[in-house]
Amino acid sequence: VEKLNKRIAKLEGDNLQNRQLVDTLEISLNDAESNLRIAKQQLQVLQREKSDLVNQMKSLKMQLEDAAAQYEHAKSSVQQEKKVIENVLLEERKAKEQAERSKRQLESRMEELMAKKSKFMC
Protein backbone atom coordinates (compact mmCIF):
# COMPACT_ATOMS: atom_id res chain seq x y z
CA VAL A 1 0.00 0.00 0.00
CA GLU A 2 2.83 2.35 0.84
CA LYS A 3 4.42 1.69 -2.53
CA LEU A 4 1.11 2.34 -4.18
CA ASN A 5 0.68 5.60 -2.25
CA LYS A 6 4.18 6.69 -3.28
CA ARG A 7 3.43 5.72 -6.84
CA ILE A 8 0.08 7.59 -6.71
CA ALA A 9 1.83 10.65 -5.28
CA LYS A 10 4.47 10.47 -8.00
CA LEU A 11 1.83 10.01 -10.69
CA GLU A 12 -0.19 12.91 -9.28
CA GLY A 13 2.97 15.06 -9.37
CA ASP A 14 3.67 13.98 -12.93
CA ASN A 15 0.03 14.63 -13.80
CA LEU A 16 0.24 18.12 -12.27
CA GLN A 17 3.40 18.86 -14.24
CA ASN A 18 1.74 17.57 -17.41
CA ARG A 19 -1.34 19.76 -16.80
CA GLN A 20 0.89 22.78 -16.24
CA LEU A 21 2.76 21.96 -19.43
CA VAL A 22 -0.54 21.58 -21.32
CA ASP A 23 -1.74 24.94 -19.89
CA THR A 24 1.53 26.57 -20.97
CA LEU A 25 1.25 25.04 -24.43
CA GLU A 26 -2.39 26.18 -24.75
CA ILE A 27 -1.40 29.73 -23.77
CA SER A 28 1.44 29.62 -26.30
CA LEU A 29 -0.94 28.27 -28.95
CA ASN A 30 -3.47 31.04 -28.23
CA ASP A 31 -0.70 33.65 -28.43
CA ALA A 32 0.52 32.17 -31.70
CA GLU A 33 -3.02 32.15 -33.14
CA SER A 34 -3.52 35.75 -32.04
CA ASN A 35 -0.20 36.76 -33.60
CA LEU A 36 -1.17 34.91 -36.78
CA ARG A 37 -4.49 36.82 -36.98
CA ILE A 38 -2.67 40.12 -36.48
CA ALA A 39 -0.08 39.17 -39.12
CA LYS A 40 -2.85 38.25 -41.58
CA GLN A 41 -4.57 41.60 -40.98
CA GLN A 42 -1.28 43.43 -41.50
CA LEU A 43 -0.70 41.40 -44.66
CA GLN A 44 -4.11 42.42 -45.99
CA VAL A 45 -3.36 46.08 -45.24
CA LEU A 46 0.02 45.82 -46.96
CA GLN A 47 -1.52 44.05 -49.96
CA ARG A 48 -4.11 46.85 -50.28
CA GLU A 49 -1.37 49.47 -50.02
CA LYS A 50 0.69 47.60 -52.62
CA SER A 51 -2.30 47.45 -54.95
CA ASP A 52 -2.95 51.17 -54.48
CA LEU A 53 0.71 51.97 -55.14
CA VAL A 54 0.77 49.77 -58.25
CA ASN A 55 -2.32 51.57 -59.56
CA GLN A 56 -0.79 54.95 -58.72
CA MET A 57 2.42 53.92 -60.48
CA LYS A 58 0.45 52.88 -63.59
CA SER A 59 -1.38 56.20 -63.56
CA LEU A 60 1.86 58.16 -63.20
CA LYS A 61 3.45 56.13 -65.97
CA MET A 62 0.53 56.94 -68.28
CA GLN A 63 0.81 60.63 -67.34
CA LEU A 64 4.54 60.52 -68.07
CA GLU A 65 3.93 58.89 -71.45
CA ASP A 66 1.27 61.52 -72.27
CA ALA A 67 3.62 64.32 -71.23
CA ALA A 68 6.43 62.82 -73.32
CA ALA A 69 4.11 62.56 -76.33
CA GLN A 70 2.98 66.17 -75.85
CA TYR A 71 6.61 67.26 -75.55
CA GLU A 72 7.54 65.48 -78.77
CA HIS A 73 4.53 66.97 -80.55
CA ALA A 74 5.38 70.46 -79.29
CA LYS A 75 9.04 69.99 -80.25
CA SER A 76 8.03 68.89 -83.75
CA SER A 77 5.65 71.84 -84.09
CA VAL A 78 8.33 74.29 -82.94
CA GLN A 79 10.82 72.83 -85.41
CA GLN A 80 8.30 73.13 -88.24
CA GLU A 81 7.43 76.68 -87.23
CA LYS A 82 11.15 77.52 -87.06
CA LYS A 83 11.62 76.22 -90.62
CA VAL A 84 8.67 78.29 -91.83
CA ILE A 85 10.02 81.42 -90.11
CA GLU A 86 13.50 80.79 -91.53
CA ASN A 87 12.01 80.43 -95.03
CA VAL A 88 9.99 83.63 -94.62
CA LEU A 89 13.08 85.44 -93.35
CA LEU A 90 15.11 84.16 -96.31
CA GLU A 91 12.43 85.31 -98.75
CA GLU A 92 12.31 88.72 -97.05
CA ARG A 93 16.11 89.04 -97.32
CA LYS A 94 15.98 88.11 -101.00
CA ALA A 95 13.18 90.62 -101.58
CA LYS A 96 15.12 93.34 -99.71
CA GLU A 97 18.28 92.62 -101.72
CA GLN A 98 16.27 92.74 -104.94
CA ALA A 99 14.67 96.01 -103.85
CA GLU A 100 18.10 97.48 -103.06
CA ARG A 101 19.43 96.38 -106.49
CA SER A 102 16.39 97.86 -108.17
CA LYS A 103 16.83 101.10 -106.20
CA ARG A 104 20.50 101.32 -107.19
CA GLN A 105 19.61 100.68 -110.84
CA LEU A 106 16.89 103.32 -110.66
CA GLU A 107 19.26 105.81 -109.01
CA SER A 108 21.88 105.08 -111.65
CA ARG A 109 19.32 105.55 -114.41
CA MET A 110 18.14 108.79 -112.78
CA GLU A 111 21.73 110.06 -112.64
CA GLU A 112 22.16 109.24 -116.33
CA LEU A 113 18.94 111.05 -117.19
CA MET A 114 19.91 114.04 -115.05
CA ALA A 115 23.30 114.15 -116.79
CA LYS A 116 21.61 114.07 -120.21
CA LYS A 117 19.16 116.72 -119.07
CA SER A 118 22.06 118.92 -117.88
CA LYS A 119 23.80 118.50 -121.25
CA PHE A 120 20.58 119.20 -123.05
CA MET A 121 19.88 122.31 -120.98
CA CYS A 122 23.28 123.73 -121.61
Image (cartoon, grey):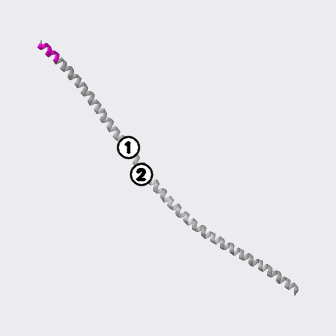
The residue lying at 28 percent from left, 30 percent from top is 94
Vertical arrangement, residue 58 with respect to residue 89, above or below: below
Give the main secondary structure, helix, strand or loop, of the magenta stretch: helix
Vertical arrangement, residue 114 with respect to residue 9, above or below: above
Whole-percent x, y for residue 14 in the image: 79, 79
Whole-percent x, y for residue 29 in the image: 67, 73
- How many numbered marks does the figure carry? 2
Residue type highlighted by circle 2: Asp
- Secondary structure category for the residue under label 1: helix
- Residues in magenta? 114-121
Quadrant of the rendered structure where residue 44 is? bottom right
Vertical arrangement, residue 72 with respect to residue 90, above or below: below
Vertical arrangement, residue 115 with respect to residue 52, above or below: above
Q: Magenta span has 17?
A: no
Residue furthest bottom in the image:
1
Residue 28 shown left or right of residue 57 in the figure? right
> Is the residue marked by circle 1 packed among few (<14), some (14-19), or many (20+) residues within 10 Å?
few
Name the image quarter holding the C terminus: top left
Q: Magenta span has 117?
A: yes
Whole-percent x, y for residue 121 in the image: 11, 14
- Secondary structure category for the residue under label 2: helix
Q: Which residue is mark 1?
A: 76
The residue lying at 72 percent from left, 74 percent from top is 24
The residue lying at 38 percent from left, 45 percent from top is 74
Q: Which residue is mark 2?
A: 66
Residue type highlighted by circle 1: Ser
Residue 57 shown left or right of residue 27 in the figure? left
State how far apart marks 1 and 2 are (Cα). Answer: 15 Å
